[in-house]
Image (cartoon, rainbow, N blue to C red):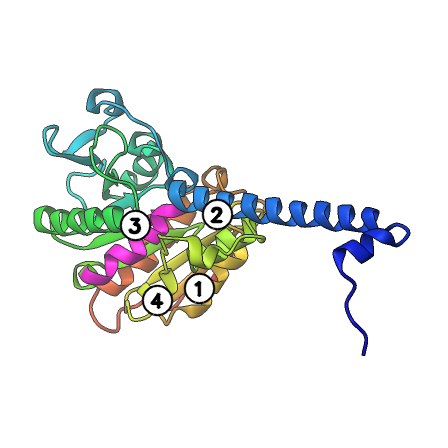
Amino acid sequence: MLRPLSSSALRSRPGGSRCIATAAATLRIVVLSALSYLIALTGIAMFQNHLLYFPDQASVAEMVSGGLSPWPTGSDFRGLSAEPLASSARATAIVFHGNAGHAGHRQFYAEALTRLGLRVILAEYPAYGPRAGELGEPSLVADAEQTIALAHARHGGPLLVIGESLGAGVAAAASVRHREAIAGLLLITPWDRLEHVASHHYPMLPVKWLLRDRYDSVGHLATIGRPVLVVVAGDDQIVPSRFGRALYDSLVEPKRLSVIAGAAHNDWFDRLDEAWWRQAIDFLLAGSRRSGDHDESSPACWHF
């Protein structure tokens, strides 16, 4: 019967000591690599909010400019508002912005939408701008639900919900509980599920197990029953357009997909004109008209 060589016997063979040293060095590398990987995973798990949320702090006075007013008041600040150029608003649009900066950086929404007769509320998140609070999906979604409820109570309908990037995930989750108050949703550069975007950027990490925040827009919108317009940027490297298309594919009618050719994640707005916004808003408000008064002329997918 063959017996395994003892370490002393191995050392006595030619090159035996060198084999032991090589094996020991390899083992040390493996152990150190595994330890480094575990430390990295622990760090990502502990500090993942710093990888997803990039808030800018600012006072209310610093954020109010260009016709924007604190909403609902300066002392109970939840965002910024702008009234339409016409005498009265035909609808109210709540905008949930992306993960960086603050609501005051999104004045371009107010400029585009007030021209179409909409009241615009640029919602602010907890821990952004002048607001206190915690970062994370539970905090942002619960706060967004309160904003939607308050806007409906103060202004009535029709009420449109707009979300961009992270804001699309917030809007999708917050709209579920208030779908009866909502006429339609506009989701710009959205994902289907956050874990898919995270896996795209960090393919070596078990993001499914690390992520605390899920932002599962497919699950949230499965039974929304409202018009949804999904907008993807053709050259988006941050949230690749395939994730927005996957969200669109999961939705039931009425839905539309708009592809902004050549646009990246942060420059899509410059490629849109008033005609695009008018077409988008007309589609979303169609659901608030009389039954059977839907706009069938709007194509299922339009490119820009």
Circle 4: element type: helix
For the residue pair 180 and 112, the one nearer the viewer reads as 180
Residue 82: tell me if it is visible.
Answer: no
Identify residue type, mark 4.
Gly
What's the magenta region? Answer: 162-177
The answer to which image quadrant residue 183 occupies is: bottom left
State which mark lies toward you, 3 or 2. Answer: 2
For the residue pair 83 and 213, the one nearer the viewer reads as 213
Q: Position of residue 82 (x, y in %)?
A: 22, 35
Q: Are marks 2 and 1 in contact (CB under 8 Å)?
A: no
Identify residue type, mark 3.
Glu
Q: Position of residue 225 (x, y in %)?
A: 28, 69
Local crowd size for mark 4, using a 10 Å CA cut-off: few (<14), some (14–19), many (≥20): some
Please give the residue where the numbered disc 4 appears in the rendered image: 219
Kindly identify which numbered label has been placed on residue 41.
Answer: 2
Kindly identify which numbered label has been placed on residue 144.
Answer: none
Please give the residue where the numbered disc 3 appears in the rendered image: 137
Q: CA distance from mark 4 to mark 2?
A: 27 Å
Residue for point 78% across, 54% down:
8
| Sequence order check, earlier mark of 3 and 2 | 2
